[in-house]
Image: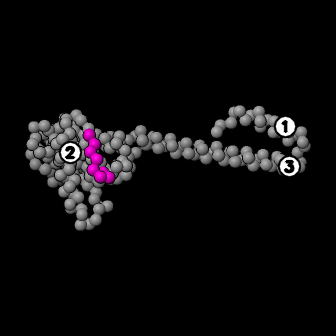
Amino acid sequence: MKITALLVLKAAPEATDPVILANASDVSHFGYFQRSSVKEFVVFVGRTVASRTPPSQRQSVQHEEYKVHAYNRNGLCAVGFMDDHYPVRSAFSLLNQVIDEYQKSFGETWRSAKEDSSQPWPYLAQALTKFQDPAEADKLLKIQRELDETKIILHKTIDSVLARGEKLDSLVEKSSDLSMASQMFYKQAKKTNSCCTIL
């Protein structure tokens, strides 16, 4: 799961071409000579998808092994380029957080933007790194992952208890110290309690 780029654009209906307000990308997994072309492609596709995402709408566009997710909140649009394995709910949660942070940092100044901003926005670069793990963007996914880990530990514990029980059975059968009556009592008690065993 990888995020390649995050963009924030002014994509108001009255604007002819979306204006890039902030842009962060990680193209290190591409070849050195491909990186500039990939950045240009990200800008082109980002503008295109932002211009075609109606206000107050979300959409995802598939392109080969990548998905481009866009969220337009009343003209302020966040666009994310992720690989196909990045969960959609986490992607839109991330885009929502990016728009929230942009509005906290810059307020409504984006409405007067006329041309692309070349100033880096540190939060966007940090978000690009931090949210490579989808669980950081989606708290429910994080809780589900913790529950799955707990369930695995619980199964291991139950398996180890069952393994100990099987060893105890073989020891009881092999023991010459126990009388036949004690062995019968043990087997009968185990058979009676077997209805309560958790599998």
The residue segment tinted magenta is 59-66
> Under tag 3, what secondary structure?
loop
In this rendering, the answer to whether 122 lies above or below 71 is: below
Q: What residue sits right under mark 2 in the picture?
A: 49
Q: Quick one: quadrant of the C terminus?
A: top right
Q: Amino acid at mark 3?
A: Ser
> Under tag 1, what secondary structure?
helix
Q: Specify how the rendered protein is coloured.
A: one colour
Q: Nearer the viewer, mark 2 or mark 1?
A: 2
Q: Residues within 10 Å of mark 1 (few under 14, many from 20)?
A: few
What's the mark number on residue 175? 3
From this viewpoint, is residue 3 visible? no
Residue appearing at x 82%, y 39% in the figure: 186
Q: Residues within 10 Å of mark 2 (few under 14, many from 20)?
A: many
Residue 144 is situated, as x and y percent measured from the top left of the image, at: 46, 40
Q: Amino acid at mark 1?
A: Phe
Residue appearing at x 26%, y 55% in the figure: 25
Q: What kind of secondary structure does the magenta stretch mostly adopt? A: strand
* C-alpha gap between disc 3 and disc 1: 14 Å
User: Is the residue under label 1 in contact with that under label 3 (CB below 8 Å)?
Assistant: no
User: Is the residue under label 2 in contact with that under label 3 (CB below 8 Å)?
Assistant: no
